[in-house]
Amino acid sequence: MTSTSELATGEHIFKITSYSVLKEFGVDNYVCSSTFTVGGHEFYIKMYPGGDEKEAEEFISIYLVLNNVDKELLVQYDFCLVDISGDSVVVGPRSYVASPNTFTPKNPAWGFGCFIKRVDLEASQYLKDDCFMVRCRVWFLKARQSVGPSDNLHQHLAKLLESGKMADVTFEVKEESFNAHRIVLAARSPVFKQLLSQNSESDTRSRVRIEDVKPPVFKALLRYVYTEELPSDGDEGDADKGLTSLDQQMLVAADKYAIKMLKFIYEENLCNKLSLNTVASTFELAEKYNCNRLKAACLEFAAQPETLIALMQTHAKISEGSEQQNTIGLTGLPDLLNKLSVAFISN
């Protein structure tokens, strides 16, 4: 059998009523949502208002459960509080995007033991009339099968890329060169299609100069185009232009070549990896490349009291001249703080 993949997506809103009663049930007591179906698989949400264990007793714990698991399924998901009116989705004081987790018959549930402190929920606008709502979004690659012998297409394409056989275009990136195949690139990216169509079809091997993407990033981009494989974590890339991680650089490259799924993946990765050192540069990136989900995550992260205090102290040092604003990761700080102040005034 041959198989291809398509992205299955879905979401579910879980409304929790009688919160004041439920929270008194204590640790390891839960309530469940109704089931919902995504890509042919049935899920439900399990919530522990009093925490799922002693260490989380000050928190609400929340998990996504795959019902009737008969084989492994790699799933990515997120949880966030939403406005109780249901008219609009608003990221709450805690929003979590999970890295892909493998749901199995032995481990059918994944989630967050410390989703939000109950005192934070109770002080927020998201608890109204003893009720609040949580949105869960789910996405994963769904295999589609068709009749025919297995040909391991991605493996063959990986070997084709690595060997360079029958390549008809060479990309020159800095001091490195990468051989590729027009037909594969044109099928996967409208930008590559337009770029390569501008070269003379009579050329047996066109050479294209790439000026604004680093070699490791372009190599990873090509690998994804051919195989849908992602580079491993740990490569922090170069920071000379404010892009402090490989994730940030891959998002920019995905946007440049209009590879939507790759951009989506790295936007979610960055949401999940925000830190005090990266939130300003990531926010600047989100603004520039129209990543609304990432922008909201940056604002939510920066609004946490300890983070906000640290960011304001850094901004004060910049204003005093004791720290350079063009330091890597800080160029987007003034805009981030300005957006936060507008949000606070609006609320």
Image: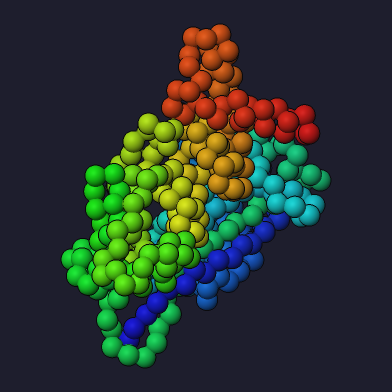
| Camera-nearest residue between 85 and 157 | 157
The way the protein has been coloured in the rendering is rainbow
Report the residue at 65% width, 45% height from top: 91
Q: Is residue 218 above or below residue 243?
A: below
Quick check: 297 above or below 42?
above
Q: Looking at this view, name the residue that lies furthest to the bottom.
A: 147
Could you tell me which quadrant the C terminus lies in? Answer: top right
Where, by quadrant of the figure, is residue 334 drawn? top right
- Number of residue marks: 0
Tell me if I can see residue 168 in this picture. no
Q: Is residue 196 visible?
A: yes
Q: Residue at x 61, y 30 (%)?
A: 336
Residue placed at 42% from the left, 68% from the top?
197
Q: Name the spot of residue 75 as percent of width and height, x first.
A: 45, 61
Q: Is residue 61 left or right of residue 229?
A: right
Q: Residue at x 50, y 33 (%)?
A: 281
Q: Residue 213: x percent and y percent? A: 37, 46
User: In the shown orientation, is residue 10 left or right of residue 125?
Assistant: left
Q: Nearer the viewer, residue 180 or 332?
A: 180
Q: Is residue 30 toward the left or the right of residue 181 in the image?
A: right
Q: Quadrant of the N terminus?
A: bottom left
In the figure, residue 262 lies in which quadrant?
Answer: bottom left
Q: Position of residue 282 (x, y in %)?
A: 51, 37
Q: Position of residue 210 (x, y in %)?
A: 36, 50
Rendered position, 308 above or below 250: above
